[in-house]
Amino acid sequence: MKADIGVVGMAVMGQNLALNIESKGYTVAVYNRTRERTEELARGPAQGKRVVPAYSLPAFIASLSRPRKVLVMVKAGAGTDAVLAELFPLLEEGDLLMDGGNAHFADTERRLAEAERRGLRYLGVGISGGEYGALHGPAIMPGGHREGYALVEEILLRTAAQGPEGPCCTFLGPGSAGHYVKMVHNGIEYAIMQAIAECYDLMKRGLSMTPEAMAEVFSDWNQGELSGYILEITEKILRYVDRETGRPLVEFILDTAQQKGTGKWSTQAALDEGACAPTIAAAVFARIASALKEERQAAADVLPGPRAAFNGEREVVLKELFGALYLTVVSAYAQGMRQLRQASAERGYTLSLPEVARVWMDGCIIRSRLLFPIRKALAANADLPLLFMAEPFISRWTEHHEALRNVVTRAHQAGIPVPAMSSSLDFVDAYRTARLPANVLQAQRDFFGAHTYQRVDRDGTFHTEWEML
Ligand code: 6PG
């Protein structure tokens, strides 16, 4: 019997996805560059299942029913190109290739064009949810050839997380739409992670709280409208006790964040689109700053700052902290959605933002209860410029903006950096300012470079000789 679909790359994500697809009633062919991994899988978790191991790519391709459907789950970048170069000549017109890695959208476009030249169908598929999600139901973000999607729609819908408003998978649009959406998902992921890490720092240094006490706070916050996966795992992290020391493990983890690049790409793409995504950018820069460990340690002895502790009652500060986190997290989604809207218009993705919100409701890393009102707001107004301009976010801004201001002020006065929170505050404050000081920038540009300016009181383009030479 021929396999319904094949998965190339048996690292943990590929393996778990293959097992997940099989568990939905499909026969799955699997292949890995090194034979041992496939053997281990066949002997281990895939034993007795409809998993067909193959030990060469031609044998793998031969085991697939036509049109062949191949999901590549290898390391993004050169790894994907190497596998595709081997797969292309083995496939026939009408076959479907899917890349489920975190590919850069420009790479997806290049590969899609190559597939097209060969008469193949291609999908760039964003997959989120880590190892657990891959096995039990990830969020799946496919984009590319719609006819290709039709071939795997049923499989993908059944493999995806079954969210509160339907399977967390939908065809997002042509070209690199799927990988673009996944990239922005990761940008939002970076910002939410950073905002929560800032809460931890403020509770630790500002309020001298223990990880256990912080876990209680996060647990409490996770009951309400801010409830979400990253908050949930942070609570678990804070409760985890290191076996060797008997103390919370988190305190023993080196404070230099690593990154594989998707947050950076998201920010680079925002800059290219001219999309305003300062909180996402701040989260990327915060990781970069964290990596300067040795320099930071040296500077700590040289550059003075205030005492890090807060004045004020713990309960009052914690209440404000919730408001600050709420608005920062909404900023992250708002900036990400806005970037997607701009990119969609510019790149012809034809994205449905309410559908993006729906696909993110379960399975993925940024799943959160907030996606319900986000989806609703986006569905109610297709031209919504920014989430903050719709309910319930207008009311939440009104309710919490003072808290955000107080937290940012307290943090700055205590010398504790809060780049995600302060950039969110600046972002919304700039957005709600009818007249910004960009008039001065324009005058400066005109002064030194004769770049011209426009006036508020009459039409036309003007230049002034600001100074006699
Ligand atoms: C997901 C994640 C995942 C990402 C990791 C690590 O949606 O499952 O976004 O795709 O690779 O979270 O990313 P960094 O190494 O850049 O932190």
Image (spheres, helix red, strand yellow):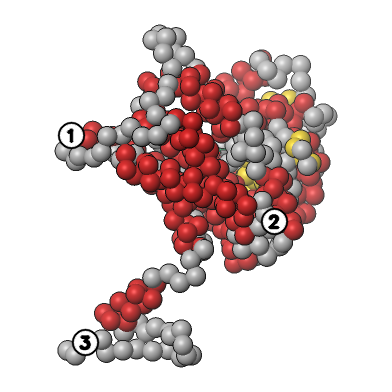
Image coordinates of residue 344 in percent, x first then y, are 63, 62
Secondary structure under tag 1 reads loop
State yes or no: discs 3 and 1 in contact (Cβ < 8 Å).
no
Camera-side residue: 428 or 252? 428
Spatial CA span between label 2 and label 3: 50 Å
Task: Name the residue carrying label 3.
Answer: 467
Q: For this view, does 457 lie left or right of residue 376? A: left
Spatial CA span between label 3 and label 1: 46 Å
Q: Is residue 164 above or below residue 392?
A: above
Residue at 78% over, 33% down: 3
Q: Amino acid at mark 1?
A: Asp
Name the image quarter holding the N terminus. Answer: top right
Q: Is mark 2 within 8 Å of ligand 1?
A: no
Task: Name the residue carrying label 1.
Answer: 301
Q: Amino acid at mark 3?
A: Glu
Q: Earlier in the sequence, mark 3 or mark 1?
A: 1
Q: Residues within 10 Å of mark 1 (few under 14, many from 20)?
A: few
Image coordinates of residue 165 in percent, x first then y, are 78, 42
Point out which mark residue 197 bears: none
Residue at 72% over, 35% down: 161
Q: For this view, does 170 lie left or right of residue 178? A: right
The answer to which quarter of the image holds residue 106 is: bottom right
Q: Does the rendering let one see residue 335?
A: yes
Q: Amino acid at mark 2?
A: Leu
Q: Is residue 99 above or below residue 465?
A: above
Residue at 42% over, 21% down: 210
